[in-house]
Image (cartoon, helix red, strand yellow):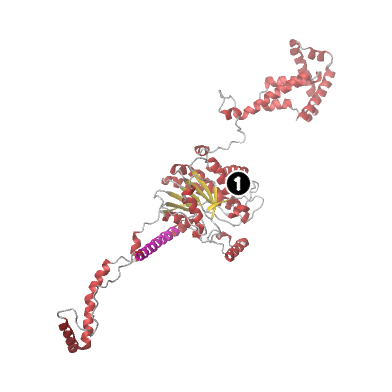
Amino acid sequence: MGGKLTYPRDEIPADKTFIVTGGNTGVGYQTAKGIAKLGGRVIIACRSEERATQALEKMQKEHREEVKQERQTQDEAAKKANPPPAATKDTPKPPATGDKDTTGEGSGDKDTAEASATKDTGDASAEGQTTEAKEENEPIASADKEDSPPPEDDAADDVQPLKVEFMKLDLASLASTMEFINAYKAKGYPLHVLICNAGLGLVPFQKTDDGFELQFQVNYLSHFLMTLHLLPLLRESDPNSRIINLTSIVHTSGTFDLKNMQGELSYDRIKFYGNSKVYQIMNMYALNRRLKDSGISIFSVHPGYVDSEFSRGSADSKLHSFVESVSQVLHIKRNVEDGAMTSLVAALDTSYDGRSALYLKDCKVANASALARNTEKQEQLWDYSLDCIKDHITEDLLKDLHLPVPAAKDDTPTTDEAKGEAETKPETPNKSEEPTSTQDEAKSKSEEEVESKPEEKTESKEEVEESKADEDDKSKVEEVESKPEEDIEAKPEAESESKVDEKEEEKKEESEDQSPTDEGGDTKTDEEEVKSEEVKGDEDKGQEDGEGE
């Protein structure tokens, strides 16, 4: 772009529509005005209707004056290019006083009459004659005035007004953001370019009514919510629609800590401002991956250090005062007109058609910070952001946008679903399919252990068999599979006696199956020996299961 910043000034089609948040002041004001002067329709979205009305009146007045000045400049240039013709040599010259008449007849008589009139009437009559001559000339001068161009003020009356209008938006409220979204959709306007310009910085710690840190919500989160809901309009309106986020060079100082996103642990004005700005760039990359081949381009723009009302809430900040002093000494502060240049390039320059996920600085592409380009962190921020606005979006919205719907914590898709649904629909929900597989493994494991145990392990097998007959849910299988050691040690003697009765009943069933091992174990011991061996066996089983865990 060279030394001087500039932007394309091609005429914009009358139906091309732009939204500029915070378009009532500063960089946003100049961005909205620059687009409107080229013919585009601009929606200025801001919180204060009074300030917006004043801004619109000011913008229209400036536009009329600028058009008038442009016309005067063009007229002057035209006059210089086509000067009036110079006087020719054939033009007769009036005779000098006292010269002889060279014009022909009647000239001598005229001189005699004039001399006589002067002698008879004196100087007073001559003055009266002069006055009459002036009065006779006045009607002629008046006629010439009627043919002259109208006054400059009237000349600007035919200037077409800018197509700009106000819509209320309070980015510190998610409810207000949703009201703006619905009101805009109700207008039936298309949307070609969304410029997320509004923001604040270096403010003391405070939370919004939605429970979020103020800079996080105003600079980033509410714009993200608006973007998601307006994506369908951007898709429908133009194959080269654009989303522009106003970020800052301060994004390089930003950090990403999920434990301190809302100042839960600490808060610093400049750090959290930088955080909100790096989130904008991170979100640009994450959204761009999801909008691949959609025809929508996304840019993040750094306007430079601009002399505007941006930091009006930080007058008490020592850092702000220091930066102001340094900027004046180094002459690095830009006026708002230059500050809007990069935004206008991102919005209007056709050389960026088909390009996306770019960080622009000084009207050209630059490199964002390493954190901003970290894909893993971008995805973490995406998930966190969706969770923050979950009450204001629906699964249907995300599906319509072809965006992934965040899966519920207990609803993990199975392998069959990932391949495209099984041939027959399972009888149980997806979330229970994995526990069913665990249950089968548990049963198999228990049966193998029981079959490999000597006589003292007989009770474990009986419990597994009884569980298989009466229990189907996972929790009871696990209870059989991994019985805690302390439960076994705390069993009273009455429980052991109950197990002896169960064993004798089992003896009859196993006698029918002709199981030599179980029969041998039962015939060789009396009731007291069985009791002591079973308790011992339970203790061994509990220790082995505990080690296996």
Instruction: Return the residue nearer the eye: 36 or 188.
Output: 36
Element type at marker 1?
loop
Q: Kindly report the secondary structure that dominates the magenta region of the rendered protein.
A: helix
* Foreground residue among 178 and 252: 252
Asked which quadrant contains residue 432, the reply is: top right
Kindly identify the residue that appears in the image at 19 percent across and 82 percent down.
Answer: 101
Q: Verify whether residue 96 appears in magenta.
A: no
Q: Residue at x 57, y 65 (%)?
A: 328
Residue 393 can be seen, yes or no: yes
Check disc 1 and report the residue beneath it. 373
Q: What segment carries the magenta color? A: 55-80
| Rendered image quadrant of residue 149 | bottom left
Residue drawn at point x = 17 percent, y = 87 percent: 116
The x and y percentages for residue 14 are 39, 50
In this rendering, the answer to whether 126 lies above or below 254 is below
Q: Give the residue displayed 25% in from the left and 73% down from the top.
A: 91
